[in-house]
Amino acid sequence: NGLVIEMIDSSLKVLEESETDVLFEVGAGHNWDQFVSAAVNMGLSGVEYLSGIPGTVGASPIQNIGAYGQEVAQIIEAVNVMDRKDRTIKTLTKEECMFAYRSSNFKTIWLHRYVIVSVECRLERQQSIDDFGQGEYSRKQVLRRLRDKGEGFSLTTIRNAVLEIRGEKSMILCEDDPNSRSVGSFFINPILLETVYLKVCESLSNLGIDGTNMPAKIVHQTNDTSCSNGDDEPHVQISAAWLIEKAGFYRGCEDEQFPGVALSSRHCLALITKESAGASATSLVGFADFIRARVEKLFGVFLKMEPTVLRSDITVVSG
């Protein structure tokens, strides 16, 4: 048992405004998707691809939420916090937060130290159609949806397309959809040194699996030291979902060793619980570790968990 404190400050203040952008201070309790909706309605860009992500603005910096090539780190100027050590209010700069792919100092060396009070975000005035990042690999699914529907590119149409796609994957909470009973993506897409990536491709080939269609892209070197060797060797981001499926875990699959939990039938990165089947935190984490162990054994890739487990009586395997 423990004490849970809910931040209820949902304020939205304009700190600076110019012809090109607006700087907001957003209360930690402000609903994230409502903030995105307000930004889109005001013609401000920078968060439209992050539509439909559950939670609050105050939670967004912790793991640097992102989707379709956008990350909250791209708009954050500073994070205002209460330091639990001395109970003082401090302002932490973007640089101090050390944002990385699905990570930040809040999730690592600062874990449990700070309470986020508000976030300062700078959003740009609506861009021209040519500036919507149509060449970004991870956005092709959204942009293809707009082209297929014959809709133009705008902040509103992009937001609507993202919400539609997330809904189809059960990534928007809905009481009537059991697949939405999850914490979203449970595993992080691995970022590997190029030399490691080539070894993974070799492992796939040895297993008779064609790795040429594995989703992969070159990314900027992350500040996550677990995938950095201190030099400028390129890094490659690969699909955790693809690896999971190639390891034999299909959408909707479950294992009797872990009662009450399963992979979503819509999205194999999401682990769901079955309300009437005796699900527990232990079985959920156990199933996750079962999946990760097989992926690592077959392909030599350790999948990191995206959520943080708070219960001290549950051991989480770390790479």
Image (cartoon, grey):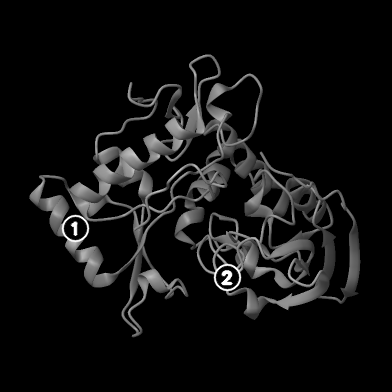
Q: Quadrant of the N terminus?
A: top right
Question: Looking at the picture, how far across and down is residue 71, in whole percent?
Answer: 60, 62
Name the residue located 67 percent from the left edge and 43 percent from the top edge.
54
In this rendered view, identify the residue nearer to me: 32 or 112.
Answer: 112
- SS type, badge 2: loop
Q: Quadrant of the C terminus?
A: bottom left
Q: Type of residue at label 2?
A: Phe
Q: Which image quadrant for residue 225?
A: bottom left
226 to 172, vertically: above or below: below
Disc 1 versus disc 2: nearer the observer? 2
Name the residue located 38 percent from the left edge and 55 percent from the top edge.
318
Tell me if mark 2 has few (under 14), some (14-19) or many (20+) residues whose alpha carbon lies within 10 angstroms of its own: many
Q: Is residue 200 left or right of residue 15?
A: left
- SS type, badge 1: helix
Determine which of the numbered discs, if any, sits on residue 256 in the image.
none
Upstream in sequence: badge 1 or badge 2: 2
In this rendered view, identify the residue nearer to me: 82 or 23.
Answer: 82
Q: Type of residue at label 1?
A: Cys
Name the residue that disc number 2 marks: 99
Name the residue located 51 percent from the left edge and 54 percent from the top edge.
139
Residue 69 is at least partly visible in this image: yes
Question: Looking at the picture, how far across and down is residue 183, in whole percent?
Answer: 56, 39
In this rendered view, identify the residue nearer to me: 26 or 132.
Answer: 26
Q: Is residue 52 left or right of residue 191?
A: right
What distance separates the C-alpha of mark 1 from that of mark 2? 29 Å
Q: Which image quadrant for residue 162?
A: top right
Name the residue that disc number 1 marks: 201
Q: Residue furthest bottom?
A: 231
Question: Looking at the picture, how far across and down is residue 238, in whole percent?
Answer: 34, 57
How many numbered marks, from 0 up? 2
